[in-house]
Image (cartoon, grey):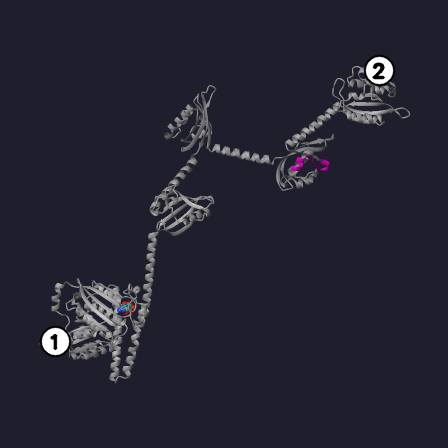
């Protein structure tokens, strides 16, 4: 029909067979060389929705193309006008405006000469195809966007090539491949990317997808080139050929590592939450205020000891039953208050839980109101804080213990904070706390808040520096130091409290002033002990020396006598010498024994009433030889009056003798010695002064100590042992007196003063009446003396001494000889040694007493033992006298005198 509407065809239309022109389903247009449409076939009119041919006839062809299509179409048109077949695809809506896409071929049609007569444009309606293409590319874009957004990697697998092709950057990134590298063989992928444990699964998944048409799913790990392992999910789908074989697999790959760890974290959190909830530490509840019902969870039921089902819907009162009786009121009023004020509700209290124990809980909630503003419900949570509470309690207890500890210790304790200036230099410290012993120990109050410089502005800054160092380094310090400010010694222990950067220092300290003093005393004592020990050592050396010294001349003397026994002069000289040496030895040994007795408290004084003047006389007499030997001048100044005292005369004579002897010793030849005695109150004051070498002041304090000798004076000592003065002091003290020394110093002489208490003066006359000393010696000559002693030498020397006194002596050297001699010799007195070789002295005495002579003869024991016990023993055995060996001659003389007197009395 449309065909009819087409006007008469111009010439060129004739070139196209009609069946073709009209039979074609494409739109065919004849365009003249001016570019105008000459003809359009029926399909074209229809497709272009042309209603009347007039609308297009002779209209410019380009006019039907919209602006956006014109450049493309014009290029094709020009090419065709230029004689070439041209092609283009462009958009041209119909005349009614329907959008259409056209695939256009323009052919030039020429005459026989080849000259172009007109153009034929064949346009195929491509709209559907175009739309499909558009949709496809849109789809592609969407997929791209979606895969990008989902971070999906796209891949393709070609089974017969065993080749993977990675189709986007994401896929390459997931597999860790370099940009640009697209393809990998399956074998490469398996070897390089899939972790060994997952390789089998991966290959099976691919095989299954290709061969059995299953969807490919793989969940596994790949190890990237940089070594990182990632979790991936791969999905794929096979595209098949008609014979059913898989042409290729298309698929996605997704890196799910992060999701996996998030999942894991979520999972963990859920587990924790569940655990927390299960542990009953958190519980939730809601109180429907209008219905007065509480809805609680499992943990609420547990905490409030309710059966689980009841906790879902229970009046508030049921809950109150579980609350600790002491807390109920507080909780009720707190809830009421929250209701009234609409405030937040929070209360800490105890509930008895299903385990039968009270749990501490914290309940919190907030009232919710309805539209009218009326309270509707109170939802909340409950936390079981028993554990925290216990920890807090423990903390408090430990805090209390700490307090108690520091309050109970005797050490001072304080904590302070170091204060620094802008440069960080320590300038002061501020007290934070202190214990009560602080005051006692330090002597001041460490008031919290006060700084040390506020209390002691003059404090030695070294203390601040010291403590600041402790804070800075964290190194504790322990020192003993003198705090000048307090003038006390302290033992101080300082430590930093808190970690690095803390400026707090704790100080523990004790006043050790007393301890130090004691220590000093101890040190002094130890020193003086050492000194005593030293003196003792020196003493023993001296002693050995002094005892040996006299032995050499004695032995020589004996030799001499043996050789020149006939020469009376030599014998006399030697005897004198030996006498001196022996006397010296006896003196030494006696001193030693005395000092030993005194220091062991064994000395016994034989006190009797005596006139001190007589003792003085005896002492002078005894020491005159040593004074005269050195040509000293002795001045004695003793008043006429009597000086009665109760004393051991021998001992006091010994005291005076020692002082005189020292004076003689320590004074260079030709010196002067003064002895004076006077009365001071009821005391006798005896003073021995010499013009000798004197005693240095520093030595005077120790001169009376045992073994003390003045170093400088040693040259004058002549065999002293350093015990003479010690003996003097002890003996004087035993008599209730004292002795002192004074010397202006070396070379200026010394003076020793003895003070002795006197007896009551009223008794003086009685004393005068009976003088103890008599001139017995003169009357005692001519006795018969028997000496029984196994020590031949000792016996003989004694015998000679006695004989010199004008007596007749018989000697016996064994007990038997002695017994016989008694009846034969008929002695007036017997001296009997106790230790005899054949029988002891006691046995000998018993025998002697059996004879007529022996029955009455006085017998004196000769023994080395002189203690009271020894004397008692001999007296009990029947001895009349007790003499200690070596018996002093004067004693023997007075004994003989006594015997002579008795004999005379008996005769008359
Ligand atoms: P000794 O004379 O045996 O050494 P003493 O105990 O009698 O011991 O005396 C102790 C020391 O005192 C003597 O060593 C001596 O140094 C000093 N001394 C004692 N008497 C005198 C004195 N009259 N003049 C100087 N020094 C004396």
551 in relation to 300, above or below: below
Q: What residue does disc 1 label?
A: 903
Where, by quadrant of the figure, is residue 110 drawn?
top right
Cα separation, mark 2 vs mark 1, equals 216 Å
Q: Residues within 10 Å of mark 2 (few under 14, many from 20)?
A: few
2 and 1 marks in contact (CB < 8 Å): no
Name which residue lies at 72% across and 26% down. 134
Q: Quadrant of the N terminus?
A: top right
Residue at the far bottom: name it: 566
Left-right relation of 802 to 46 = left
Check disc 1: other Cα within 10 Å, few if <14, some if 14-19, many if 20+: few
Q: Of 628 and 832, which appears nearest the observer?
A: 628
The residue indicated by pointer 2 is 7
Residue 500, horizontal then vertical, whole percent: 47, 44
Residue 369, above or below 787:
above
Determine the image quadrant of residue 539: bottom left
Q: Which of the two marks, 2 or 1, is nearer to us in this view?
A: 2
Q: Position of residue 257 (x, y in %)?
A: 60, 36
Q: Report whether residue 374 is seen.
A: yes
Label 2 sits on a secondary structure element that is: loop
The C terminus - image quarter:
bottom left
Q: Report if the beta carbon of the residue with label 2 is closer than 8 angstroms to ligand 1.
A: no
Percent coordinates x, y for residue 893 in the rendering: 18, 75
Which residue range is magenta in the image?
A: 159-173
Foreground pick, 605 / 645: 645
Expressed as whole percent of the image width and height from the top left, the position of residue 787 reads: 20, 77
Going from N to C along the chain, the mark reached first, 2 or 1, is 2
């Amino acid at each position: 029909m449309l065909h009819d509407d087409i006007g008469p065809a111009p010439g060129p239309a004739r070139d196209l067979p009609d069946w073709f022109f009209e039979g074609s389903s494409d739109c065919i247009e004849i365009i003249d060389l001016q570019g105008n449409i000459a003809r359009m076939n029926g399909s074209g009119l229809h497709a272009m929705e042309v209603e009347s041919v007039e609308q297009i006839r002779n209209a410019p062809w380009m006019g039907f193309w919209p602006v956006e299509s014109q450049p493309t179409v014009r290029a094709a048109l020009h090419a065709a006008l230029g004689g070439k077949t041209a092609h283009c695809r462009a958009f041209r809506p119909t005349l009614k405006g329907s959008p259409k896409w056209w695939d256009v071929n323009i052919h030039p049609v020429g005459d026989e000469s080849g000259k172009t007569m007109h153009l034929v444009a064949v346009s195929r309606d491509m709209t559907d195809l175009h739309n499909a293409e558009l949709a496809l590319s849109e789809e592609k874009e969407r997929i791209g966007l979606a895969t990008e957004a989902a971070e999906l990697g796209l891949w393709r697998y070609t089974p017969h090539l065993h080749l993977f092709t990675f189709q986007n950057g994401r896929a390459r990134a997931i597999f860790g491949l370099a940009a640009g590298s697209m393809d990998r063989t399956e074998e490469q992928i398996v070897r390089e990317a899939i972790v060994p444990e997952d390789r089998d699964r991966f290959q099976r998944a691919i095989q299954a997808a290709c061969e059995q048409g299953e969807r490919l799913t793989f969940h596994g790990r790949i190890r990237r080139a940089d070594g990182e392992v990632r979790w991936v999910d791969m999905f794929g789908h096979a595209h098949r050929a008609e014979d059913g074989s898989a042409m290729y697999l298309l698929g996605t790959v997704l890196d799910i590592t992060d999701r996996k760890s998030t999942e894991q974290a979520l999972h963990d959190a859920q587990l924790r939450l569940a655990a927390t909830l299960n542990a009953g530490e958190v519980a939730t509840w809601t109180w429907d205020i209008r219905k007065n019902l509480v809805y609680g969870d499992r943990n609420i039921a547990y905490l409030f000891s309710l059966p689980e089902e009841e906790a879902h819907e229970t009046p508030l009162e049921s809950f109150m039953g579980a609350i600790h009786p002491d807390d109920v009121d507080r909780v009720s009023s707190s809830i009421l208050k929250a209701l009234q004020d609409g405030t937040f509700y929070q209360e800490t209290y105890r509930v008895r839980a299903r385990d039968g124990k009270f749990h501490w809980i914290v309940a919190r909630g907030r009232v919710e109101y309805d539209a009218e503003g009326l309270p509707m419900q109170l939802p909340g949570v409950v936390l079981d804080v028993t554990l925290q509470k216990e920890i807090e309690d423990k903390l408090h207890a430990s805090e209390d213990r700490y307090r108690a500890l520091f309050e109970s210790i005797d050490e001072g304790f304080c904590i302070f904070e170091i204060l620094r200036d802008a440069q960080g230099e320590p300038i002061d410290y501020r007290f934070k706390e202190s214990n009560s012993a602080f005051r006692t120990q330090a002597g001041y109050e460490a008031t919290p808040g006060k700084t040390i410089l506020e209390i002691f502005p003059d404090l030695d800054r070294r203390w601040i520096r010291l403590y600041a160092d402790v804070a800075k380094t964290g190194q504790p310090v322990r020192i003993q130091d003198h705090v000048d400010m307090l003038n006390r010694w302290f033992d101080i222990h300082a430590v930093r409290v808190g970690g690095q950067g803390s400026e707090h220092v704790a100080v523990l300290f004790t006043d050790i002033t007393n301890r130090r003093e004691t220590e000093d005393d101890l040190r002094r004592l130890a020193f003086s002990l050492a000194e005593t020990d030293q003196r003792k050592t020196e003493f023993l050396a001296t002693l050995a020396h002094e005892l040996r010294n006299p032995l050499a001349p004695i032995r020589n003397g004996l030799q001499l006598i043996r050789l020149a026994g006939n020469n009376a002069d030599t014998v006399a000289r030697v005897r004198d010498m030996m006498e001196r040496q022996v006397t010296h030895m006896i003196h030494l040994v006696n001193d030693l024994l005395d000092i030993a007795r005194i220091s062991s408290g064994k000395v016994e004084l034989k006190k009797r009433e005596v006139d001190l003047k007589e003792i003085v006389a005896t002492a002078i007499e005894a020491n005159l030889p040593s004074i005269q030997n050195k040509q000293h001048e002795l001045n004695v100044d003793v008043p006429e009056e009597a000086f009665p005292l109760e004393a051991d005369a021998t001992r006091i004579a010994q005291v005076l003798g020692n002082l005189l002897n020292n004076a003689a010793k320590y004074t260079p030849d030709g010196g002067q010695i003064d002895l004076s005695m006077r009365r001071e109150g009821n005391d006798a004051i005896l003073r021995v002064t010499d013009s000798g070498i004197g005693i240095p002041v520093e030595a005077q304090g120790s001169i009376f100590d045992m073994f003390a000798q003045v170093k400088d004076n040693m040259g004058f000592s002549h065999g002293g042992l350093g015990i003479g003065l010690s003996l003097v002091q002890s003996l004087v003290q035993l008599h209730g007196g004292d002795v002192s020394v004074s010397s202006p110093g070396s070379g200026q002489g010394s003076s020793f003063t003895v003070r002795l208490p006197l007896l009551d003066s009223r008794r003086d006359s009685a004393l005068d009446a009976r003088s103890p000393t008599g001139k017995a010696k003169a009357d005692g000559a001519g006795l018969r003396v028997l000496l029984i002693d196994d020590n031949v030498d000792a016996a003989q020397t004694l015998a000679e001494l006695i004989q010199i006194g004008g007596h007749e002596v018989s000697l016996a050297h064994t007990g038997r000889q002695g017994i016989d001699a008694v009846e034969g010799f008929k002695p007036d007195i017997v001296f009997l040694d106790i230790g005899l070789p054949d029988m002891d002295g006691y046995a000998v005495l018993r025998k002697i007493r059996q004879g007529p002579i022996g029955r009455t003869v006085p017998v004196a024991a000769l023994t080395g033992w002189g203690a009271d016990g020894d004397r008692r023993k001999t007296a009990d055995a029947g001895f009349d006298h007790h003499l200690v060996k070596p018996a002093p001659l004067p004693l023997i003389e007075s004994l003989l005198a006594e015997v002579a007197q008795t004999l005379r009395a008996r005769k008359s």
